[in-house]
Image (cartoon, rainbow, N blue to C red):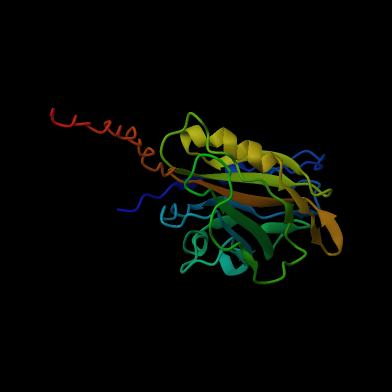
Amino acid sequence: MARWNLVCLTLATVASISGSASPVGPGQTAGQAGATFVPARLLGGSLPLTPSPNVVAQIEETLQVAVDVAGRVAQMTRLRASPLPTDLLTPAVGGWRFQAALDQGRAVSSRVLVAAIFRPPQIDNSPTLGTPPVNRAAPSDEIPFPIDTQMPPYPPVAIGEGVVLVEVLVGVDGRVQQRRLASGAGGFDQAALDAASRWSFRPARWNGRAVEAYAYLVFGFRQPVVGPPPAVKPPPAVKPPPVVVPPPAR
């Protein structure tokens, strides 16, 4: 039976966006007071499954997710993806629920970035076989788009495999302002958080101006495949010296 991780966030956990200096008044959620634009934020959903170890390459996929005023996923566009027979993200992300974006206190439709990197099933970061990901569509200005990414290492103390979801708040300068675990996987959490901090983005824009926006980074750690130990060559056979038979006596 497939194992799914669940992201469990509630409206009560939605933190304020940096730069919202006004106090929160009655009937307002954190981040709404004093802010002209408040980006959409994930409330809950399932994570994708780990790919088969038969796929030996690093796997990448980037989605642009359209979120309607009710916080539901209205459309998903694959912006960049590794050539695989099936999509990794769309089956899970299609069921995500968001707190809709707000523009001057009114719920509006918006777009959100979801990007995934699944490590190859190996311990180190040496090159692997496989076809690199290809661009499939141009991103909207509404999402922060990655310009520099980082694949986390396989932690030396980790065991098995896991999928970690990290929420990052991307500032108007394209840098990660905040990051936190939306769904963890034990020994893989810190490696995912450290990698997310090193990502940089083209900042999101709303009505022509740069704004802060949330992005969701999925880091997959696959069980390293360890090959059999090298065969031990037997020592070379020692050829015995020839037997010299003396000639018979005359």
Q: Position of residue 58 (x, y in %)?
A: 55, 53
User: In this orientation, does residue 68 appear?
Assistant: no
- Is 38 above or below relative to 184? below
Residue in the image at 47% along x and 38% along y:
185
Q: Quadrant of residue 114?
A: bottom right
145 or 131, which lies in front? Answer: 131
Q: Position of residue 184 (x, y in %)?
A: 51, 39
User: In this orientation, does residue 203 appear?
Assistant: yes
Q: Quadrant of residue 124?
A: top right
Residue in the image at 40% along x and 50% along y:
4
Q: Position of residue 240 (x, y in %)?
A: 26, 31
Residue in the image at 66% along x and 59% along y:
112
Q: Quadrant of residue 224?
A: top left
Residue 205 relative to residue 242: left or right: right
102 or 164, which lies in front? Answer: 164
Q: Position of residue 99 (x, y in %)?
A: 61, 54
Residue 201 relative to residue 130: left or right: right
111 or 235, which lies in front? Answer: 235
Q: Quadrant of the image for the C terminus? A: top left
Residue that extends furthest to the right in the rendered view of this protein:
209
- Is 70 above or below relative to 126? below
Residue 141 relative to residue 126: left or right: right
- Is 136 above or below relative to 100? below
7 or 174, which lies in front? Answer: 174
- Is 22 above or below relative to 172? above
Q: How many marks?
A: 0
